Image (spheres, rainbow, N blue to C red):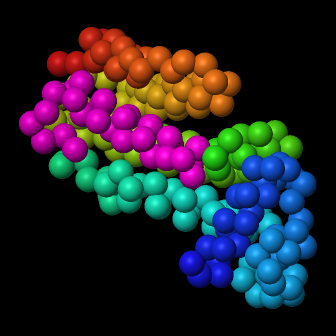
């Protein structure tokens, strides 16, 4: 493991125990076994570490489930609207449910109302999801797989609904409640009944 990865790992451990706001650069350096000055050679701030952690964990989660890039034409192919939407949403859900991503989101979500950096990460993630959904929905509309009166609005509402379902599933996991395995499927079935051609 390289030094940056060690630092990211240390922040994850510390934040999961104490909360991100309670973690200092000195505690991170101590956990890694380096001086605080040496830590600053790798990262200029805790916010920079958290930002790097987010990108690193997201990339690793995408690779672990086989998502290298978002190819709209390949995604659509000759599949039904239901298959396309479920595969897309389920891939995103599996990325979010990766154990390391799940831990990261748990930390970030608990901090987003008091930590600007945490809020910015959540905004960035949501914007990426909305933009990817818009790209997909424009292609679905052009290829006549779906008929949307307003593509942007349909994409936004779909992305936010999927996002909310995943958030709810995360809350169920963290609370120890039983997860509803079919919630996403039922939502997509209903969405396809409304917009499918």
The magenta stretch spans residue 96 = yes
Residue 169 visible in the picture: yes
> Which residue is found at the position 43% from the left and 27% from the top?
158
> Which residue is found at the position 13% from the left and 42% from the top?
77
Q: Does residue 140 sit above or below 165 in this rendering?
A: below
Q: What is the x, y in percent for residue 31?
A: 80, 71
Quadrant containing the C terminus is: top left
> Which residue is found at the position 54% from the left and 59% from the top?
57
Location of residue 144 by image quarter: top left
Q: Examine the residues drawn in magenta and state their main secondary structure.
A: helix
Q: Which residues are magenta?
A: 75-102
The magenta stretch spans residue 125 = no
Whether residue 78 sits left or right of residue 113 in the image: it is left
Residue at the limit of the structure toward the left, as seen here: 78
Q: Nearer the viewer, residue 16 or 152?
A: 16
Q: Nearer the viewer, residue 130 or 106?
A: 106
Residue 191 visible in the picture: no
Quadrant containing the N terminus is: bottom right
Q: Does residue 98 sit above or below 83 in this rendering?
A: below
Q: What is the x, y in percent for residue 63?
A: 38, 59
Whether residue 51 sits left or right of residue 64 in the image: it is right
Q: What is the x, y in percent for residue 70?
A: 32, 53
Q: What is the x, y in percent for residue 153?
A: 45, 27
Q: Does residue 186 sit above or below 118 in this rendering?
A: above
Figure disc tally: 0
């Amino acid at each position: 493991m390289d030094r940056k990865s060690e630092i990211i790992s240390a922040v994850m451990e510390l934040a999961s125990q104490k909360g991100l706001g309670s973690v200092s650069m000195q505690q991170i350096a101590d956990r890694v076994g380096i001086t605080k000055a040496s830590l600053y050679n790798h990262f200029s701030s805790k916010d920079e570490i958290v930002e790097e952690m987010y990108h690193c964990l997201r990339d690793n989660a995408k690779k672990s489930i086989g998502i290298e890039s978002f190819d709209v034409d390949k995604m659509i192919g000759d599949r039904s609207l239901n298959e396309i939407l479920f595969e897309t949403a389920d891939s995103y859900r599996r990325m979010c449910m990766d154990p390391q991503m799940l831990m990261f989101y748990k930390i970030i979500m608990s901090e987003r109302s008091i930590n600007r950096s945490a809020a910015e990460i959540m905004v960035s993630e949501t914007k990426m999801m909305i933009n990817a959904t818009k790209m997909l929905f424009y292609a679905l509309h052009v290829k006549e797989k779906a008929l949307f009166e307003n593509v942007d609005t349909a994409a936004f509402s779909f992305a936010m609904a999927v996002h909310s379902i995943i958030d709810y599933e995360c809350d169920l996991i963290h609370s120890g409640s039983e997860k509803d395995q079919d919630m996403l499927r039922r939502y997509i079935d209903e969405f396809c009944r409304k917009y499918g051609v």
